[in-house]
Structures are given as structure tokens and as C-alpha cells.
Image (tube, grey):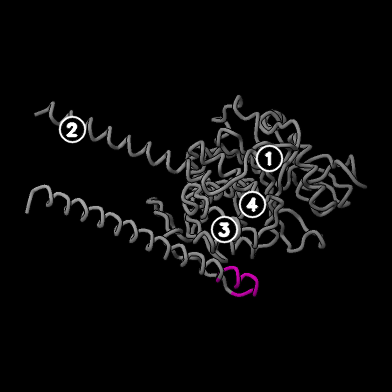
Amino acid sequence: MAEKELFSILKRTLILLSISFALFLIFVNSFKLVDFIVKIDYVLSNFQKDMDIPAIRNDFTIIKADEKRFDINTAYTAKSLGYIDKLPLVDGSEWGEGINILIVGSDKKNFQNTKSRSDVIILLRIIKSGKILSISIPRDSLIKVRDGEWSGNYDKIGHSLYWGGLDNLKKNVEELVASPISKVVIIDNFRSFEAFLAIMGGIRTDKDLQGELGIKWIRNRQFKLGDIERCKRQQYFLEKASEKIWQITKGGNYFYSLLMYDALKRIVSTDLTKEEFLNILYTLKVNNFNPKIDFYNSVLPGTFSTYDSKLLLKNNLACWIPDESAVDKFRFLFYSKNNQFTLLSQKKMEFWTFFEIDFKNFMKNFKSTLNKKKKDKKEYVKNL
């Protein structure tokens, strides 16, 4: 057999093996994706039927556990878990163009028809350079009521939902940061949070948070600083949750992101559309968002105090007085001119929009790997 013919056969064999291997990888990943979709449907079905919601165990949700060992029977402070207040690290010069999203955790389902309070108030700032700032506003923060029958009186911001509904809470947060809120996300009962944990496959903190344990962990305020410590722990939880979401969506992959949006939309209430969600992910993706680096968080600083409530007809109630200098900084960081945010409608999002970024990143990493190998080879030859 001629050498030329042998080379041709070898070449065709390699091409066939490469195609077979690629098809095998596609099949395996497709199987994993289908398995994940089926399990999500099972979680959502159980959520609707008020049945037990088991956490999803799938390659998409598995994440390497923290090597740090914790006692399962101990409730740790946020600092012990590794939480760091990252507000001092925020460079204010780049936070001028972005969107503000309010996350609300209510203690009752159908809060719009039933009197309820907001257990969780978190304001997110997402900017065009692909960074996120997350601020917890303690529910006991004392504010001057903006609108309605009790306008001008002082009360805890967490009572805003009770006295005037979501619109009242939104206006009071806008008043606090002196800037409009573009979108709202509401988790209106504990079961919705349980379903979220199940879809994530659990969130690993000092414990594997899922089911009742997850609810107890996120609500726990049996600490010296009470609700303030709870807010810090919730910010630590958000750090881990953002890492998990970014992992599950494969760094903002188009199809996985759509899957995630459709699943979460069925367990939370939000006015954030699918197209807007994709635009946000596109912004993060194009800026190579890294949740361990580009996710900043803090809790509104302040001091403990007391006040007399005309609304509740009670005196000497505990409250949290926001630090004025911190409020001024938040107003600077969260400032937006109006409600028209290009970040939510910068372009029509399609598969090829995301694929282009993935392909560019793949080629960049490929070239970087080749250059590294060339460099290592030169060093090896040089040292001979």
C-alpha cells in the first residue's frame, strides 16, 4: 500500500473518530439536559400540588463543596462563613449606567390580597460593565412614610407592604435610594423558596440548604445582632446562589438561561420579561462576569434605636436607624436618571447572539492554551 494512500486512510479514520466523539458528547449532554428538564417539571408539579419537593441531583446542579468543615448543629455568623462587606471595594465611577431590581420576600402567599410584611428587602444594581451590587435593607429600618393616609409619619420599612402594598414598599425604597426601581422580583411564600432551592439542587453554605432546613437557615435571626446578622447571612447566601445559577446556565448559555427563566417564572412573581432577562445575562456574559469577583454585597449600615409608632399605637419599639453617610453613598451608586434603561432592551436576543460570544471565548482560550504550550516548550528546550 502506497504511503500516500495510507496517510489518506489514517486521515479519514481520524476525522471519523472526531465526528463520532463529538456526536457522543452531544448525545451525553443532551441526555443530561433532558434529565434536568424532567426533574424540573417534577419539582414544579410537586410545588403546585403542595407535595414534598426533593432537590434535583444532576450534573448541572453538582458543585464542589467547600473544604471548610462546619458543625451541622451550630448556627454560624456570616463572618464565620466567609462573608465580607464588599461595599468599600466598590469603585463609584463605573456605576452610573445600570438598572435597579427590588427583591422582596413576603411572609404570606397572595400578599396583594392579604395583609403581609416583607421579611426580605434586597436591592440589586446591575451595570453595563457586568457587575452586580446587592444591598440588604433591614426590615426594621426607620423611614418617613411617603404616601397614603400615614404620610409623614415614621415607621419600619418592612411594614410598607402591610400598610400600602407592593407599590408603597417600592416607593419607599425609591425614596431611600433617591432613584427609580426598574423591576421587581417577589418570593411570596416559603414554599416558593423551597422550590427555588430544589431547582438549584440545594445551595451549599455551612449546610446543604434544601427543604425545611433551607427555610430555617435563611430566616434564622437568633444572633446577637438579630435581623442585621440575618441580612448578612442572606447576602452570603446570594453569593453562593449567584455562583450556582451561573454554573447551571453554563456561564449564561442561551438555552440553559431560557430553561432557568421559565422554571423560576413559575415559582416567583416578577415583571421582568424573558427578553429583559436575556439582555441582562448578555451584559454579564459579554463582560466575562465572574460571580466570585464581580458580585459586590453589603447591608445598609446603621444603629439600633427605638421609636414611638402612631400607626401601631405602640411606644418604644425597636428599629434600625440608617447611617446617613451610607445612604448618601447608596444614592450615588444606585442613581438612574429615569425608567428607560438600555440595559433591558439593548438588542433582540437570539441564539446566535450568545453563540458568537461563546465562540470568541473558545477561540481566545484555545489560542491562550497554544501560546502557553509554546512558551513551556521553549522553556523546556532552554533548560536542556
Real-space CA distance between mark 4 and mark 3, rounded to the nearest whole angstrom = 30 Å
Q: Secondary structure at mark 4?
A: helix
Q: Residues within 10 Å of mark 3 (few under 14, many from 20)?
A: some
Front-most of 83 and 197? 197
Query: What is the total number of numbered labels drawn onto the structure image?
Result: 4
Task: Judge whether 115 appears above or below 366 on screen.
Answer: below
The residue beneath circle 1 is: 100
Q: Position of residue 141 (x, y in %)?
A: 74, 43
Type of amino acid at the residue the image marks with label 1: Asn
The residue beneath circle 3 is: 217
Front-most of 5 and 195? 5
Q: Nearer the viewer, mark 4 or mark 3?
A: 4
Does the CB distance between marks 1 and 3 fall below 8 Å?
A: no
Q: Position of residue 248 (x, y in %)?
A: 48, 54
Q: Which residues are magenta?
A: 42-51
The residue beneath circle 4 is: 274
Q: Main secondary structure of the magenta part?
A: helix
Q: Nearer the viewer, mark 4 or mark 1?
A: 4
Q: Earlier in the sequence, mark 1 or mark 3?
A: 1
